[in-house]
Amino acid sequence: MDSYLTLKLIHILSSTVLLGTGAGIAFFMLTAYLSKSATALLVTCKNVILGDWVFTAPAIIIQVITGFLLMHKLNYSYTSTWFYSVLTLFLAIGACWLPVVRIQYRLKSIIEASVDQETIPDSFHSLFKVWFLLGVPAFFMVISIFYLMIFKPFL
């Protein structure tokens, strides 16, 4: 089997996992939030954290490894505008995702403390808004990377 095609397949699959997990996490977290059920939010927060560790974190590692291997195999320049664009977006997504992960743990702690009263504290609402607002630009940056990968402008 051609190693380039294998790398490309792994790279595409891991990017799909990233996009799908991110969209799924956002959807389920938002629907749990809109349900106004502390119990639903607690279960969802736990699953969102688990999903990030099981799917997102490994996919990020795979993206970095396969991305650099593909760059090497295709002899793409690490000083090209295209590479700088991809790298900048990747790092900006990480700058959104890392705080989101920390926020998810804080959201879980907040809702754990109030689940017996089946109430959602104000601190949860305000932190959830930050979580959501960090996800919006990250989502569009992921779409932008897909664009760069498919159309390869600046090469």
Image: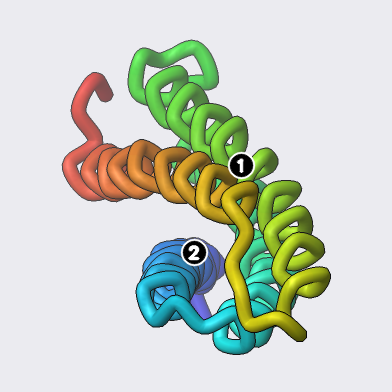
Question: What label does residue 147 carry, if any?
Answer: none
- Where disc 2 sits, the SS reads helix
Amino acid of disc 2: Leu
Q: Quadrant of residue 99?
A: top right
Horizontal arrangement in the rendering, residue 96 relative to residue 43 (left or right):
left
Amino acid of disc 1: Phe
2 and 1 marks in contact (CB < 8 Å): no
- Where disc 1 sits, the SS reads helix
Q: Quadrant of the C terminus?
A: top left
Residue depicted at 77% across the width and 59% down the height? 105
Task: For label 1, count other residues whose C-alpha is less than 10 Å away and answer few (under 14), some (14-19) or many (20+).
Answer: some
Residue at mark 2 to residue at mark 1: CA–CA distance: 17 Å
Would you name the residue on which mark 1 appears? 68
Of label 2 and label 1, which has the lower sequence position? 2
Give the answer, above or below, for where 93 lies relative to 45: above
Colour pattern: rainbow
Nearer to us: label 2 or label 1: 2
Is there any visible trace of residue 8 in the rendered image? no
Relative image position of residue 144 (x, y in whole percent)? 27, 39
Would you name the residue on which mark 2 appears? 18
Horizontal arrangement in the rendering, residue 131 relative to residue 133 (left or right):
right
